[in-house]
Amino acid sequence: MDSRKKYELVAKVLAGASCRETAISVGINNGLLYQWVRYYRMKGYQGFNSLFIRESCEKNCEIYSSK
């Protein structure tokens, strides 16, 4: 899931949608969505977006280091 979609889910929750129902509707764990919402509240959009860029880089590093 790209960072734009993650942001859309967070925005839904911040607008009043249920975190649990929103997570279920896209097939993710509601705890994960709650973490995204919490991180967005703490860091704002730039910090939120950088979280996913960093996660993506870490995953790519793991892929290359396992080869």
Image (cartoon, grey):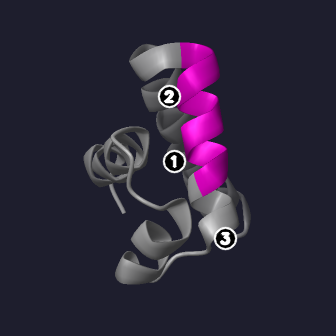
The secondary structure type at the circle numbered 1 is helix
Of the numbered discs 1 and 3, the one sitting upstream in the chain is 1
For the point 36% across and 63% down, the residue is: 1
Give the residue pinned by disc 3.
67
Question: For the magenta stretch, what is the residue range?
Answer: 34-43
**Cα distance between the residues tagged 1 and 3:** 17 Å
Which of 7/62 is in front?
7
Q: Is residue 3 left or right of residue 56?
A: left
Viewer-nearest of discs 3 and 2: 2
- Disc assigned to residue 66: none
Q: Is residue 10 left or right of residue 60?
A: left
- Amino acid carrying label 3: it is Lys
Give the residue pinned by disc 2.
48
For the point 51% across and 47% down, the residue is: 56
Q: Is residue 13 above or below residue 53?
A: below
The secondary structure type at the circle numbered 3 is loop
